Amino acid sequence: MKKLLILVALLVAGSAAFFLLNNPLGRLVKLAVEEFGPRMTQADVRVGNIKISATDGQGAISGLLLGNPKGFKTEYALKANKIEISIDPSSLAQNVVVIHSVVIDAPQINYEKSDHGTNFDAIQRNIEQYLGEGGGKKDDRGAGKKMIVDSLIIHNAKVSYGGTVDLTLPDIKLHNIGKKTGGATSAQVVKAIIGELTAQMALAIPAAVAGGVKSAVKGLFGK
């Protein structure tokens, strides 16, 4: 009996070590992102590595890439090598996961126009179509699990437009995503982020283009 108890204890300890060392929570999130991301956006979605501690909820995501929908030529829409995330661990077993903070640091963005609008307009339309078809409900992992994001910051985003304009966006800050509705699906969260990012670029890029034209004219006439 004593030997059996020792064996059980070793199995429990081994299972805990496997969980901590192999980070199955991070792997599950990675699988969900790469499975449902393309369905939402109709574009390639990949992530390099995700590590999330089930004990303190601190985590990091590296190598996130959001491709472009069909009809656009640039290599990708958005690429982020560093994302920091903080989750309330006690909420992981609940229907609504509470994410305290998400910080996306220095993402690289290609903003591209076609005859049917920009690549980010197309991504936004695809997400809206996905939500309209009920995809946000049926595809979330964990039987309709939702989330509340207390704070999301996109810091130092670098935007390239048409090979002629390169600029850095002001920090983008979103708060309490999903709080008023008792939680948002992953598609609704992505829609809110893409929507705000698109709005900021729609303001910043024309101003940058106008500034570039003004500088060129000034240089031409030496004034």
Image: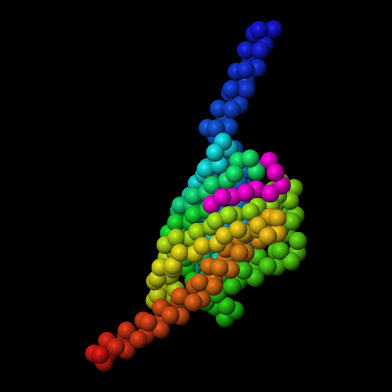
Q: Is residue 179 visible?
A: yes
Judging from the image, the colouring scheme is rainbow
User: Where is 5 relative to 20, above or below?
Assistant: above
Instruction: Please tell me which residue lies in front, 73 or 202.
Output: 202
Q: Quadrant of the C terminus?
A: bottom left
Q: Which residues are magenta?
A: 92-101
Look at 49% across and 52% down and name the residue there: 83
145 versus 208 height, above or below: above
Locate residue 193, reporting x and y percent.
57, 63
Q: What residue is at 63 percent from the left and 14 percent from the top?
A: 7
Magenta part, dominant SS: strand
Q: Nearer the viewer, residue 17 or 176?
A: 176
Give the residue furthest to the bottom: 221
Q: Is residue 60 left or right of residue 91?
A: left
Residue 5 within the magenta-colored segment of the rendering = no
> Does residue 68 appear to the left or right of 134 in the view shown?
left
User: Residue 182: horizontal and vertical position, in percent?
Assistant: 70, 55
| Residue 11 image point, x, y percent | 62, 20
Can you name the residue that lies furthest to the left here?
Answer: 222
Q: Is residue 154 left or right of residue 70?
A: left
Report the residue at 54% width, 78% height from top: 114
The residue sitting at 64% across, 8% down in the picture is 3
Residue that protrudes farthest toward the front in the picture: 180
- Residue in the foreground of this view, choosing between 86 and 223: 86
